[in-house]
Amino acid sequence: MQKHFDISEFTPITPTAPISVGAHGGRAKCLQRLIRLDLPVPRTVALSFSAVRSIAAGQDPDTAALLAEFGEGPLISVRPSSEDPDWGGPGAILNIGMNDAQHKTLAHKLGQPAADALYLRFIQAYAVHVARLDPDMFELPQTSDRSAIDMMLHDFESEMEEPFPQDPARQLADVLRSMARAWEGPSARLLRQGKGAPADAGLGLVVQEMAIGVGNSGIGECGSGVIQFVDGDTGLPQITGRYLSQSQGREALVAEEGAIYLTRDGRGPSLEELCPEVFEDLKRYGDLSRARLREEMQIEFTIEAGNLYVLDAVRVARTARAGVRIAVALAASGIIPEAEAVLRVEPRALSELLHRQVDPADRRTAVIARGIAASPGAATGRLVFSSRAAQTAAAREEPCILVRRETTPGDVRGMHASVGVLTEKGGVTSHAAVIARGLGLPCVVGASSLAIDRRKRTLTAEDGRIFHEGDTVTLDGTTGVVREGAARLLEPALDDAFRTLLSWADELRDIGVRANADTPAEAKVARAFDAEGIGLCRTEHMFFDENRLSVMREMIFTDSPEDRAAALDRLLPMQRADFRELFEIMRGLPVCIRLLDPPLHEFLPQSRDGLHDLAEALDLPVSKVTARVEALSEFNPMLGMRGVRLGIAVPEIYDMQARAIFEATVEAGQSVTPEVMLPLVSARREVELVKARIDAVAAAVKAETGADFDYRLGVMVETPRAALRAEEIAPHSAFLSFGTNDLTQMTYGLSRDDAGRFMGAYVSQGVFVEDPFLRLDVEGVGELLTVGAERGRRGHPDIVLSVCGEHGGDPDSIAFCRAAGFDYVSCSPFRVPLARLAAAQLAIRDHALIR
Amino acid sequence: MQKHFDISEFTPITPTAPISVGAHGGRAKCLQRLIRLDLPVPRTVALSFSAVRSIAAGQDPDTAALLAEFGEGPLISVRPSSEDPDWGGPGAILNIGMNDAQHKTLAHKLGQPAADALYLRFIQAYAVHVARLDPDMFELPQTSDRSAIDMMLHDFESEMEEPFPQDPARQLADVLRSMARAWEGPSARLLRQGKGAPADAGLGLVVQEMAIGVGNSGIGECGSGVIQFVDGDTGLPQITGRYLSQSQGREALVAEEGAIYLTRDGRGPSLEELCPEVFEDLKRYGDLSRARLREEMQIEFTIEAGNLYVLDAVRVARTARAGVRIAVALAASGIIPEAEAVLRVEPRALSELLHRQVDPADRRTAVIARGIAASPGAATGRLVFSSRAAQTAAAREEPCILVRRETTPGDVRGMHASVGVLTEKGGVTSHAAVIARGLGLPCVVGASSLAIDRRKRTLTAEDGRIFHEGDTVTLDGTTGVVREGAARLLEPALDDAFRTLLSWADELRDIGVRANADTPAEAKVARAFDAEGIGLCRTEHMFFDENRLSVMREMIFTDSPEDRAAALDRLLPMQRADFRELFEIMRGLPVCIRLLDPPLHEFLPQSRDGLHDLAEALDLPVSKVTARVEALSEFNPMLGMRGVRLGIAVPEIYDMQARAIFEATVEAGQSVTPEVMLPLVSARREVELVKARIDAVAAAVKAETGADFDYRLGVMVETPRAALRAEEIAPHSAFLSFGTNDLTQMTYGLSRDDAGRFMGAYVSQGVFVEDPFLRLDVEGVGELLTVGAERGRRGHPDIVLSVCGEHGGDPDSIAFCRAAGFDYVSCSPFRVPLARLAAAQLAIRDHALIR
C-alpha cells in the first residue's frame, strides 16, 4: 500500500507556521502562542483535521518522515487537539519510541529504574489504548525491573501473536491510527454532539518531544506539575496546583500520592523551596500568558534534569462566580476591553450567582424526589403540605418547604411564607414555577414519582420511604432534586465584580429590561437588580389576602351594580395602598399595572368545607352559594370569562382598580406616570369601551383632587387575534406588551398547566425542537410577534412594544425581540441580570464592538 | 311663501315615463309595468324621493298643479312607494278631494248613502292620520247620514279651531306633508333600519285617481278585492283572495265581514258567478303579470259601476316552501332561467323545509323556557333528565326531550334516543348544539332561566311552575322556545320542487359540499341530501357504546404498550365494522375520518358511583382508579392532551384505527379511497411521526390481505400555528381541512363552551360584530385561513383545501372559502342543502350568470 502523507498535513509548530484552531485544533494553536511568547515548549508538530481524517479512513501515515522532524531517537507524546476542548478526545499517549534499544540508552542516561519505568509504562499504554488488550492483564507491577518488562512483553506477544513492535515509526503509526479511529467511534461522537459539536467536528493531534520527568537524582530534579494563578472556585488571585517529583503527565498528578504544594506557605514542602528559579519562571510565564493570551491559564510543565519545559496550557476551569471575577479583573487591568469581559460570561450561568446553591461537595444524602428544575437556588426547610401550615411555620420563623400537587393563586401567600416549593404536577411555566421565579424561590415541579397524601400530611419518596410534615429536606431548584436532611449551601455572589460587569453591560445594551413584579418584595428585588421599571404587575395576587378575599367574594355574590360598587369601595383603599407602595419603591420608574385577569371563580372555594364557610360568612343558603360557584365554573378557564371580558361584563372592578391607580399616583406625586394594561384583548372595541371608562375615572380623580397627572393605557397582546388586528388596536393604545405565555398557549392550542405530562416526551422525540414555553417559538409565535409589532407600528408609529411573558428572560428570545425592534423585555426580577447581560452581548455582537 | 314644486319631481306614470325603483320606489315602478301591460290602471302620478324629502323639509308642494293632472273634480288616493316594500311606510289615504261640493255631486251620481260614507271616511282619515286627532273621537258612526257628517265636522272644528278644509289642493298638501314627515319619524326609521334599510332610504308616493267601489245598485256592481293565483303557504297553483261589494281598499277586506270567495267552488257566493267577465279578465291579468313581471303577483282591484280597475299589484307573500315551488315553477315554465330560480330562494330559509315546524297558528300554550335556537325543527315529547332515561323511553318507542345542564360525549347515545334536546348552558357551538345539528335534532341551548333539579328530575319554568319527568312539552329549535304540551307540527317539505331547485344549484355550483357525519344515520342523511362525501367523520362517538366504553377504559388503565394493544385489538373489529358501514352507505364517495381527538379522561367516569363501578369492573382498588382519573384530568382540556398529541403519546390507538380503516377499505372493495385526518396538529414533526406509523399499518394490511388500495392522509388545521406553518406541513399532507371551531377558539382565546355566558352581551354591545362561532370572523380567523391556504399550496401545489368547522354551512363563510380557492366545505348533514344553494348563488353572482 502506498504511504500517503501530504506534507501540508503535518506542520512543525513555529511562531510563523500556518496553524489555526479551525484546521489543527485549540491545543495546537495554544502551543503556537506559547512558543511565540518564547516559553520553553519542546519541539511539537501539529497534524491537521484532514490528516487525522485520512488516517481514520485507512491511509497509512508516513511516520518515518514525521519522526525525522524530531531528530535522533527521542521519545515523543501524542495528544488530541479538537476545535473546542470541551468536545473531549482520546487520551494522550506518552513515551512513544520506547523499545529495547532506547531502554538500554536511557538506563545509561537516567538510571535503570527510570528506564524500566518508562518502558513498562509505554508497553502498558500501547497494549491497553492502542492494541485494546485487557487492562487487567497489563497493570503496572509493584516493582519495575527487567523481569517485569519481559513478562509484559511476553503477555503482549501471546495475546497479539506477534512481538511488541520495536520500530518507533510503526509505534507512532499505530498510535495515530488508534486515536484517529477512537474519535470516529459512535460513543465519542454522541458525547461531543451532546456538548454542541457539529457532526463533522475534526480532531487534530499534536506530536511532541517528551520532556522526561524521571531520572536518577544525579542529573538534577525531575518531575511534572500544573500551576494556575487564580482560584477556580472564587476567581480570586491565588497560586494553586501540584508538583510531583519523578512523574510524567497530568494523570500522574491526580493518581499518585506524594505531590507537593507549589508555594511556600507552611503547609508542607513546596516547589518554591525545591526549585526557586523554576518557580519564578513559572510565575513569569503565568503573567506573560495572562497578558498575551488574555486569559487565566493553567500551565502544565515538566522539570527534566533541573530544566523547565512547558508542555501545554489550558484555560483555567472555573465556576460561574469565578468566571465573572476573572473577566472583570482582566478588563480592569486593561488586558481585555470591557465589552469583551461582558461577552465572556454566559448569561444563563448568572443564575448560579443569584441564589444559594447546594455545595457540590455535599451531595451525600438520599434523593427523595426528582422533578423539573423550575426556579434556581437551594433551600433547606421542614416539609409543610398547605399554605396555612407554611404561614404558621413562617410566623414561628421556621424555614419550610411547601409541598402541593399543584399550586393555585390561593397558594401565593403560602409560597411567600416558604423557602422552597415542590409540586407533583406542572411544567416550567406552571403556576408554581412562574410565581416561584418571580419570588426568587427555589422550586421543583412535575416530581411525578412522589405520592402526596394531604390528609395524612405525608410524602412517599421514589424509594418508598415516607416523610412527614416537619421532616427536614433540601430542595435544589437548580438541578430539580430534593434530598433528605440539610445539605451545606453556598451563599449568593452578588459582589462587586458582578455589579461592575452588569454596569458595563448596561452601557452597551440597546434594549430595555424591566421586571415582572407583583409585590413590594419583588419590586425591591427588581430595583436591586437595576430593572428599568416594572413591565408587568399582576394585580390578582393582591386579592388573596384574607380580609380582601372575603370582600372579593362578597362582591361576586352581589346582584346589582350598586352593591358591587359598594363592595369594591371597601377594596379601594387597600388597592390604593398597594400601588402607592409600588410607586414609592420604584421611585419614578415606570410601573405597568395589568388590570384583573383571572376568572372570578378562582376567588371562590371549591371544597365542601370552603363552600359551607362561605355560605355562613355571606349569610346565604349553602345551595345558593354552591349554585353560584357551579355557574361560574368553566370547562376551559384559560379561554373563558377573564381578562378584559371581565372588565366589560363587570366594569365596576376595573373602575375601582383605575381609581386606586390614579389616587395612588396623586399621593405619590408628580414623578409617576402609571401604565394601565388590559389583558386578553381580542378586538378593538374591547379597548375602546374600557378606555372610555378609565378615561372617565381619570377625569373624576383629577377633578376631585385638583391634581394633574398623565397615564398610559395599553394592551397585553395574548391572543393570536390581537396580534393579527394590532393595526386597528394600536391607535387606542400607548403600548402593546406581548404576553408570550398565553400567546404560546393559544398559538399551539396547548395549556401550559397540562402540557407538563407530555412535553418531556415531545421534546425528546423532537416533535417540538424545544419547549415553547421555555424558548420562544420563533417560527409560529414569533411570526405573530413580528406581525403584531409591524401592524401595531403601522397603526400608531410611536407605540411602545415589549414582551412581558416568561420569555422576556431568555437570551434567544431577547435576541428575537431586539431584532424585531421591541423597546423592552420584562422578566422575573431574578432574571433581570441575565437579561441585561444577554441584551448587552447582542448589541456587542451586532455592532461588532468586539472582533 | 313661494310654492316650490319642481316639475321633474312629479311624474305622470305612462309606459315611457322615466320611473325607476331607485327614484320613485317599487310601487310606482310596478304600476308602470302594469300600465305597459295595458291593465286598466287609473291615472297615477309618481312623486320622487327627493320631492317627498323636500316636502318633509318644509317646502309647500304645488298641489294645484298636481291636481290639474287629474282633470276636473276627481277623488284621489295617496300610497307610499319605498324602494323595498318590506321597509314599510305610512298608510294609504283615500278619497282626497271629498268636501261639501263633492258630497253633493256624488250623492247625485252614486246615491246618498255612498256619498255620506265616502265623506265620513275621509273626514275620519284626515282627522286621525293627517291632523293626528284622537282616533276614539273619530270612530265611524253606525249609521251614515248628514247629521253624522255634521257632527264629525263640528268635532273637527272644535278640536282644530278651524273648519274642515274644503280645498282639495289644501287637503292633498296636508296629506303629502303628513306622510312625508311620518317617514322621517324616529320610530319609522328604526323599524325600517331593522329590516336592512339604509339610513338615507327614500320614500316615494303615488297619487292615484280613485276607482270608487261604492254606489247604488242602479249603476252596476261596485266593490273591491284582491286576487292571487298560487297558495302562499304551499306555492301550489290556486286562485285565492276575497271580494267585498260596496267597499274600498285593502284594509276594508280584512276588517269587514261579508267578503265573498272568488271562484265557484260550492263554498258560497263567488265573484266568478257575480261578474264572470271581470273574473275572466282578472285571470288573464294574472297570467300576463306572471309572464311579464316574472313573478307571482297579488292584484288589488276595484269594480266601479261594473268596470274593473287594477289599483296595484304586489309580490305574493309566501312561506319558504311556497317560495321554492314558485321559483321552480316559474323556471319550469320558461318564464325565468333556472339560475334565477336558484337565486330567488334565501338559503337560510331552506332549513324551514328540512324540519318539522310548529304550526304558526298553534302557538297557544305557555312558554316554559326560552333559550338559543341551536338546531332547527320542532318536536313534541316527554321530559327526561338523563341519557339513560332517554334510552329507556326510546326502547318503549316513547318520544322524549332530553334536558341537561350541558351535554358531554357521554350523552350522545341519549341524544340519539331523543326527539329534542334542551340545555341550560352553552351557546350555538356548544357540544349539544353541534351534535344536535349533526343529528338534525331540534335543540335549544343556554336556557338559563330554567332551574333543573337532576335528583328530583324536575324543571322549574321561568314562571315558577314545576315540570316533572314524563310531562309532555314541545321544543322549537327554530325559535328557541319550549312550550307546555303538544303543539300541532307541520311536516318537512322535501318535495320535487326542492330537489329540482338543488339539482339546478349543483349544476351551477363551483365549490364542493360535503357533510360532517359520524354515524350511519348521519351518513344516510348526507347521501339523501346529495353531499359529495363525508368531510369530517369524528370517531370518538364510536367509543361510547357500552361494551366499547368498558374496553376503552380497560385500555386506559393498562400499563404497557402490549396490554394496550391487546385491549385495542378487541375494539378493532367493531371499528372496522363502523367504517365498512360508512363506506357502504357512501358508495365510493370520499370519507374523511378524523382519528381520535378528545382527551382520554372524557372516557372515564367522574361521579363517585361511576368510579366505584369502574374499580369493580377493572378489579382495581377504588383509590387507584380515582388517582388515575385525577391524574388524567386537565385544567383546560381544550388545550390539553388530545388530538395528535394522544396519537404520539399512545400510538397504539391510531394504529388500531388506521388498521380498522384499511381493513374496512379492503372489505368494501376497490372503489373506496379513505381519507385519514390528524386533529390538533401544531408542528410538522407530529405529522411525520404519525404518518410513518400509519404508512406502516397500510403496508401491513396490504401484505396480509394481498389487496391494494390507496389512502390519503391529511391534517386538520385547528391551531393558529398549523395555519402559520402550513407550508412545511403541506408536503406531508394530501389535504388541509380547517377546523374553524377550534381555530376560532384559539385565535380569540375563547372557549365555545364557556363563551355562552357573555356572548349575547358582547354582540349586543357591539364588542364582537357577530358571534364568531356562528359567522366566520373574516378579519382574524379568516386571515389565518387565507394564510394557511396560500402557504399550504406553496408547500404542496395540488393540496386539497377545505373547511369542516360549523362555519361550513354558513353562506357568508362559504363565500369566504370560495374566494380563497377552497375545494370544498363540509357541514352538518342538515345544512348541506343550504350550503349547496348558497354556493350556487355565489357562482351565479360571480360569473354574472344573471344580470
Image (tube, coloured by chain):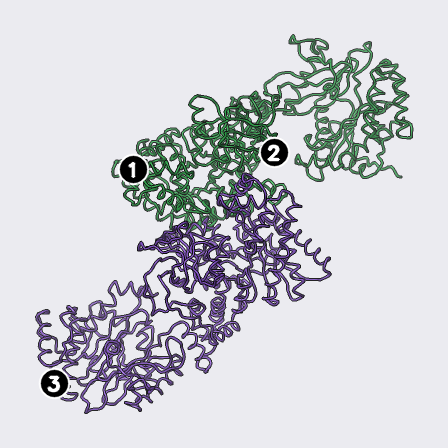
Chain colours: A green, B purple
Give residue A80's position: percent from left, percent from top.
75, 30
| Above or below, comparing residue A116 to residue B14 in the picture | above
Q: Residues within 10 Å of mark 1 (few under 14, many from 20)?
A: some
Query: Does B659 sit left or right of A224 as displayed?
Result: left
Mark 1 to mark 3 CA distance (whole Å): 79 Å
Asked if residue A815 can be seen in this view, the reply is: no
Foreground pick, B328 / B35: B328
Residue B273 has which mark? none
Q: Chain of mark 1?
A: A
Residue A569 has which mark? 1
The amino acid type of the residue labelled 1 equals Asp
The amino acid type of the residue labelled 2 equals Arg
Q: Quadrant of the C terminus of chain B?
A: bottom left
Query: Does B325 sit left or right of A132 as displayed?
Result: left
Q: Helix or strand or loop: what does disc 3 sit on?
A: helix
For disc 3, the marked residue is: B104
Q: Helix or strand or loop: what does disc 2 sit on?
A: loop
For disc 2, the marked residue is: A851
| Above or below, comparing residue B595 to residue B100 in the picture | above
The amino acid type of the residue labelled 3 equals Lys
Give residue A647's position: percent from left, percent from top.
36, 45
Residue shown at the point (40%, 75%) measured from the top left: B322
Foreground pick, A758 / A366: A366
Pointer 2 or 1: first along the chain: 1
